[in-house]
């Protein structure tokens, strides 16, 4: 995908010019709250004979993200990286059987950041960009609806919106916190969809 090639090129450029002014790298631990649209899995089970269907979903994942960026001035930066959103889980029961399913996603993101310095050491920022994600779904059913079982994958490009803060520890090291929102991860007719709300905490290194 064109976006993936762009992100790969951006990260390569960052790695080959690491000591240029304005370049930075970020490593963070993430905590994602994933909300699964159950209509895809519910529909597959009902279409294959499930009677008295009851379903639920859950999705809290601790994962990671890596970013590289370039800061043009104290107020504007661009960055690209990889995000692992984690996995949302699906559980269903029905007359004579049950099912377990999952939807997971990860991919590259490119975003622009607008920052507002609040002091010499603290700044806040907002960001907007896109994520090119690979989404994988799995459903394992038993009993009357066993024919609904199967795996599927798809690729989507979705908007990313977020806010965050940086706290300067030294000339080279900042503490960084992010909150990001991405909806529509997946396709209704192929994998189902989920929404990711993600909190990230880590360190930024300014080259």
Image (cartoon, rainbow, N blue to C red):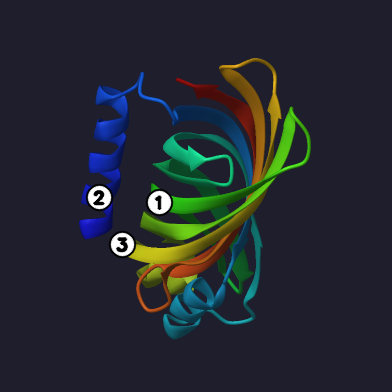
Q: Spatial distance from mark 3 to mark 2, Cα to Cα?
A: 16 Å
Q: Position of residue 114 (x, y in %)?
A: 58, 52
- Residue drawn 37% across and 55% down? 133
Question: Quadrant where the C terminus lies?
Answer: top left
Q: Residues within 10 Å of mark 2 (few under 14, many from 20)?
A: some
Residue 69 visible from this viewpoint: yes
Q: Residues within 10 Å of mark 3 (few under 14, many from 20)?
A: some
Q: Spatial distance from mark 1 to mark 3, Cα to Cα?
A: 16 Å
Q: Is residue 37 left or right of residue 150?
A: right
Which residue is denoted by mark 2 in the rendering? 6
Which residue is denoted by mark 3 in the rendering? 155
Specify the quadrant of the image occupied by residue 2: bottom left
Which residue is denoted by mark 1 in the rendering? 110
Label 3: element kind: strand
Label 1: element kind: strand
Q: Are marks 1 and 2 in contact (CB under 8 Å)?
A: yes
- Residue drawn 46% across and 43% down? 83
Q: Spatial distance from mark 1 to mark 2, Cα to Cα?
A: 9 Å
Q: Is residue 44 above or below residue 30?
A: below
Label 2: element kind: helix
Tell which of 96 and 166 is nearer to you: 166
Residue 105 visible from this viewpoint: no
Q: Which mark is residue 2?
A: none
């Amino acid at each position: 995908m064109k976006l993936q090639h762009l992100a790969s090129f951006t990260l390569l450029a960052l790695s080959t010019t690491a000591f240029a002014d304005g370049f930075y790298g970020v490593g963070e631990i993430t905590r994602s709250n994933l909300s699964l649209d159950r209509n895809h899995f519910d529909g597959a089970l009902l279409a294959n004979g499930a009677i008295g269907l009851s379903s639920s979903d859950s999705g809290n994942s601790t994962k990671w993200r890596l970013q590289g960026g370039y800061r043009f001035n104290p107020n504007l930066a661009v960055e690209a990286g990889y995000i692992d959103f984690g996995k949302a889980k699906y559980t269903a029961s029905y007359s004579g059987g049950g099912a377990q399913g999952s939807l997971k996603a990860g991919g590259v993101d490119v975003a622009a950041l607008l920052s507002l310095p609040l002091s010499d050491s603290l700044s806040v920022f907002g960001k907007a960009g896109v994520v090119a994600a690979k989404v994988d779904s799995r459903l394992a059913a038993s009993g009357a609806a066993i024919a609904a079982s199967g795996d599927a994958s798809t690729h989507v490009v979705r908007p990313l919106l977020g806010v965050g803060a940086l706290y300067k520890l030294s000339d080279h090291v900042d503490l960084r916190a992010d909150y990001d929102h991405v909806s529509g991860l997946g396709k209704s007719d192929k994998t189902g969809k989920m929404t990711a709300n993600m909190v990230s905490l880590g360190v930024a290194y300014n080259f």
